[in-house]
Image: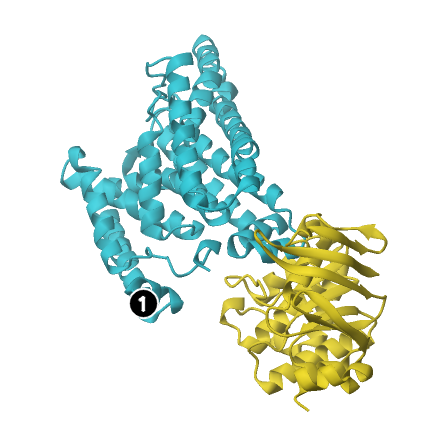
Amino acid sequence: MTPATNLRAVPFARRYLTFTWLVLGVAAAVMVAAALFQPSILVDTFVTGGMWALMAAGLALVFGVMNIPNFAHGELFLIGSLVGFTVFSPIQEAILENPDATLLKVIGPFPGMIAAALVGAAVGVGLEVLLFRPLRRRSREQWVMNTFLLTAGVSVLIVNADRLLIGNDFRGITRYWDVRPIQVLGVSISVDRAMVFVIAISTIVVFSLFLQRTRIGRAIRAVAQDEAGAQMAGIDLNRIFMLTLGLSSALAALAGASLLFMFPSFPDAGVQPLYLAWYVVILAGLGNVQGAIAGAFIVALLQTLTVYYVGVGWVDVLPTAFIILILLFKPSGLFGSAVKGIWEQ
Amino acid sequence: MLELTNVEAGYQLLQVLWDVTLRVDEGEFVALLGPNGAGKTTTLRTIAGLVEPIRGTVSFRGRSIGGLAPHQISRMGIGYVSESLNLFPAMSVLENLLVGAYAVRDRTRIWANMDLVFELFPRLHERRDQLAGTLSGGERKMLAIGRGLMPSPSLLLVDEPSLGLAPIPTLAAFEALKQLSQRGMTILLVEQNVNTTLRLVDRAYVLEQGRIVLEGTGEQLLGNNHVQEAYLGI
């Protein structure tokens, strides 16, 4: 038996829990230090972390429930940014024409975000119904590999369709809310960034409560833990799969639309968010949604520290190196043993 | 209530059931006995919809259910407690039971069924907040049976409750099934523990190499030569 499988046999082995706590403790200590000496690090960490959490939670959910490594997840971010841009552009013009319309200014950005989430959900449901369901019906052999190839193909398809139909140029906005920055912890922070954080946190809270407390949320977790058991309890797998991919896609699209002022829409816009979401999910342990949310903030902290103290050029290098280091000590990810999915049984 | 007529079923190239005809009437406690690999579990999986029959009919309350999806069959009132239990290990006992009641919309009925389960297995009540993955073998069986009871099924399929259990928890599991049967539950039980089972049930079938070879009341089978030689070692 390799050490890795050994670990899995002992749920919550004490020494690994300790290692996880060590990493979390260091992260927390750094954040406290940041709050005291360089509060902007804390603010940046929470703003970007919230968004990576949205991306990574959806990715983890789909892997946990459907066993699909979704490499088209970034393209949902792209679709979200595109929908957000398309809906917000005319609203922005209306705002510019009527600078005194306060209400329009305040709620103007929301229709684009909501539309993005809805379109994202529809695309997710479409992918499940048109691609994964027929594949599942045909054969579940080599499922992870086949769905990986399928999602990678979908990604190429969407990126190039965007290039062909919409064009290769950047479509972005400078800001959603044209108001003065607010002060948080003595740091001046634009309302857009503050709102991104608020949107991300409230979405994550609602999403977690949905998974933990509602009948359908429980059913989704049940399918992740034992598909046959879920069916025996009267749960329709097809409905749960549809809902899961729809939800995950809606989260990614919402992230794309909310971050439009930082990441303009262009055909490759989904690449960086996709890889970041994968970093997070691998760091946290595949298929663990709560772990992914915590992991997102750790990755965001690593990124922010790199930007502040090493240089923007290293922003992908150092966090990845840290993740590799952590995986050397805990191969199943920081929270890897807490949740066990169908593929491990 | 449940009727299998000339059912043949199996997995891809391997056919397991060759000609299974059996019947369970309302309120009956019926056992399906036989050696390892005879097809007992496959029979239950076929009824529960996890295996599709190749030939023959499976009908429940006069309606053919062969080829329906497992969740549809579950919603028609057939509860299935599988050999591997298929519990949700990272969920608490309470949550496992709630998922069991997924198809039940009426809250008062959910709580009534939960009361029934806790009355039948007080141990589960003590452990209600514990994760299913941390329960003992006997407690897991109780939880699986309890989860199977949550949608108030009219027929309960139970696959080898004695598997992997020490004698005392085994007796407890049998005792619980007996109590359920006395309350009017229809049960189809798969077992290898022939002696105890035959003393417990109304009727039994013996399955060998995918075919029903014997049928009779518990007493008849206890007195049968073949059963005595092959299963009871007399």
Chain A on-screen colour: cyan
**Residue positioned 74% across, 71% down in the render:** B213
Quadrant housing residue B165: bottom right
Quadrant housing residue B45: bottom right
As drawn, the residue found furthest toward the bottom would be: B234
Asked whether, in this view, residue A154 is left or right of residue A218, the answer is left
Image spot of residue B155 (x, y percent): 77, 63
Image spot of residue A338 (x, y percent): 42, 61
Image spot of residue A182 (x, y percent): 35, 32
Viewer-nearest residue: A208 or A243 = A243
Q: Is residue A345 above or below residue A254?
A: below
Residue B127, visible in the rendered structure: no
Image spot of residue A132 (x, y percent): 52, 37
Q: Which residue is mark 1?
A: A1
Which chain's residue wears label 1? A
The chain painted yellow is: B
